[in-house]
Image (spheres, rainbow, N blue to C red):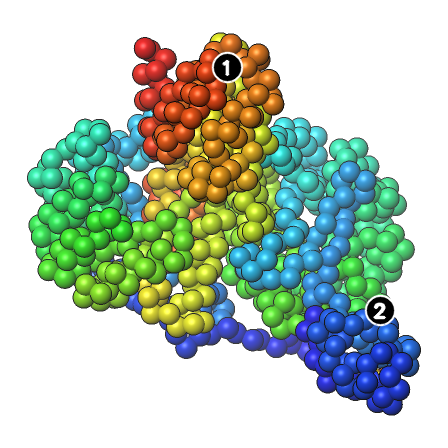
Amino acid sequence: MALKGLDIFKLTPKSNCKECGVPTCMAFSMKVAQGAIDISKCPHLSEDALAKLSEATAPLMKTLSIGAGEAEHKLGGETVLYRHEKKFVSRDLFAVTVNAQNFDEKWAETEKIDYERIGERMYVELLDLEYTGDVAAYAELAAKAKGTGRTLIIDTTDAEAARAALEVVAETKPLLNGANAENTEEFVALAKEFKVVLGVQGEDLDAIYDTIKAIEGKGYKDLVIDLGSASIKSAFENAVRVRRGALKGGDRSLGYPSIVNVAELAPGDLHMQQALASLFTVKYGSIVVLEQMTYAMALPLYGLRQNIYTDPQKPMTVEPGVYAINGADENAVCCTTVDFALTYFVVSGELERSGVPVNLIISDAGGYSVLTAWAAGKLSAGSISKFIADQGIDEKIKNHTLIIPGKVAVLKGELEQKLPDWKIVVAPNEATDLVKFLKDYAAA
Amino acid sequence: MPLKKTPQVFSASIDTVTIGTGEKAVTLGGANVMPLYAFDAPIENKPALGLELSDAGYNAELPKLADFYAGAETLADQAKRAAALDGVDFVTITLNAADPTGENRSIEDCVAECKSVCETIDLPVAIQGCGNIEKDEQLFDALAEALQGENVLLLSAREENYKSIAAAAGLAYGQKLGAESAVDINLAKQLNVLITQLGVQPTSMVMNLGSAASGYGFEYVASTMDRVKSAALAQNDAMLQMPVVTPVADDAWSVKESIASEEDFPEWGPVEERGVQMEISTAAACLASGSDAVILRHPDSVATISALIAGLM
Ligand code: SF4
């Protein structure tokens, strides 16, 4: 963190003893501030000073983890407000609410959402356990929910219910949400005893902030901030003020991941929950709790999240290989394009729409679009023919017709030389014209 | 102890651009805070919603949409329905049928149809071309002249055809025009510079920074808008201060998730609900990133997104 040289200088003995290898304490402090020398090189700093410094150099937003084993998820650790500055590191997680009455039915629906998209498993990572007033039933719910293997949120402000659930599921590292002004004492004790991350709630951000300070005062800092469900406006305001206060304002008491319950903000309205989940995926939600997850919701939502959390320096790519589209077999025509995920999606979508069986050959083109890859030398007659040879496509696929992107029609001649037993066909320039092109081709 | 408020209010602001006439005219832009940050300072003009109609008709295979437009035969009839829907601030006509590779409807017919819509409803009208560079150029030239006095928004002028569109829409006939670029801050700025150099006032134009459905490269949309808004507000870059109008509908309703049949993907459920949720997700993400107006196709999306905007203001 940007700690000024002068602040460090104040903590040194100012004796200029040179043991650090630098002529003066001032010069030493400047180098530490620049990150050019490690603070431990000065043997004369008091423990107190070191503690102060390590606090000042700690990240502004904490990284926490919830869940155990395969169900462990990272939260927080963000360093920037906008993704073009640097990659967002911890994608937001989605939870579905369940309670003692509706668990079986809801889990059966939730479990169905499980698929892969560009190498990422898409499913509901968390279950939010609503407390409905019966402690024994809550413990039973927790036990059942534990059996799903998903990470759990113990969603109650009742200490007795929280304890009953924690006794059953503590080793799965659930999130305990939550602590508030009234139950601070008991909930901090529970969080410490069971070593779980603690969610902090309050009627508004001021109340939440006070409770955070009180909890930090008790030495507990594994916290998540509940953005509240007073209104859409206040939840969004809280999301922004918390993240901005931490990363721009440097207030570490706001430097915690957030949780927002959109099921409570728009009960029974899955369209509004979808809108809110998308909003909080773009702006500063770490956990989003929904009433339900359907495929209609998941397909856009998980796609959006995957987009927002990609590395701005590194485009999303798909695994090179041969993708059989519309049930293509060895006799189906081959088509090739780049591994840039966006291109792959557009092209494969159009190929699917055509209904024509196609073997889509994706070679490693550095994650660039067709023209950029070609200009950068990542997509060439050489790279395509080499890929076909390396993958043994010559033998695997009997149909030796290869359709190449219209934008790199120039490769045709060279490809014909490099792949003498293949017929090279040039596709239209735009993917949107592919459907007609393929239908015509199949008809011919 | 209350948490200190540190609102981020800029001395620069987004330009205001008004479309339509009379009481129902809509003003876009004007904010001096980051998108939707109404808690930093009041946002005078809330983000606007346009409902999109196509001259090629609506998709009658979607039961709710078919229900909504049932009995509305002409585009003007459909526009009446659209204009009466709660939450709709302006109506958008997309001239798909003008596309020379498709129906290739004539300029005269397109103009007549747009004219009848403008005469039928008192809401502002935005008109999207068919995407063919030459045809759109001719269309917009003719529309700008024929709809004089309506203060319509013509979407969009691109690098290849901005000259004549800007001359007709922005200069000769006092319409508003959109400048469309491909999800890149530099391309957007360059086009704005070129158009204003022709004499078009920045308050006569909006930007269409390009769009993508959720999951289809939305990161480029989000980051382009983040950077454009930050340049406009924090660096007072006048060439990026135009309001952003994002046509969400076309992208949202053309991805696989919104069109693949339920027979092919039974676990995905009904097509219409998928399209609606795709449109809602994309629109919410666009607004969060900085759109001053979004264009939607489905009445259910309009209901949700207008409630979302109201909830945030
Ligand atoms: S070792 Fe410590 S006390 Fe000695 S000069 Fe370096 S900074 Fe100063």
Report the residue at 35% width, 39% height from top: B250
The foreground one among A382 and A313 is: A382
Q: Is ligand 1 closer than 8 angstroms to the Cβ of mark 1?
A: no
For residue A299, say whether it is visible. no
Q: Position of residue A228 (x, y in %)?
A: 62, 59
Q: Is ligand 1 closer than 8 angstroms to the Cβ of mark 2?
A: no
Q: Chain of mark 1?
A: A
Q: Nearer the viewer, mark 1 or mark 2?
A: 1
The amino acid on which the numbered mark 1 sits, given as a three-letter code, is Ala
Left or right of B14? Residue A221 is right
Looking at the figure, which quarter contains the C terminus of chain A? top left
Report the residue at 81% width, 47% height from top: A173
Quadrant of res B131? top left
- How many residues crowd around disc 2 within 10 Å: few (fewer than 14), some, or many (20 or more)? few
Compared with B76, B257 (above or below) is above
Label 2: element kind: loop
Left or right of A433? Residue A325 is right
Compared with A328, A195 (above or below) is below
The foreground one among A369 and A185 is: A369
Looking at the figure, which quarter contains the N terminus of chain A? bottom right
Left or right of B84? Residue A262 is right
Q: Chain of mark 2?
A: A
Residue at the spot of label 2: A218
Residue at the spot of label 1: A328
Q: Position of residue A429 (x, y in %)?
A: 34, 32
Q: Position of residue B157 (x, y in %)?
A: 24, 51
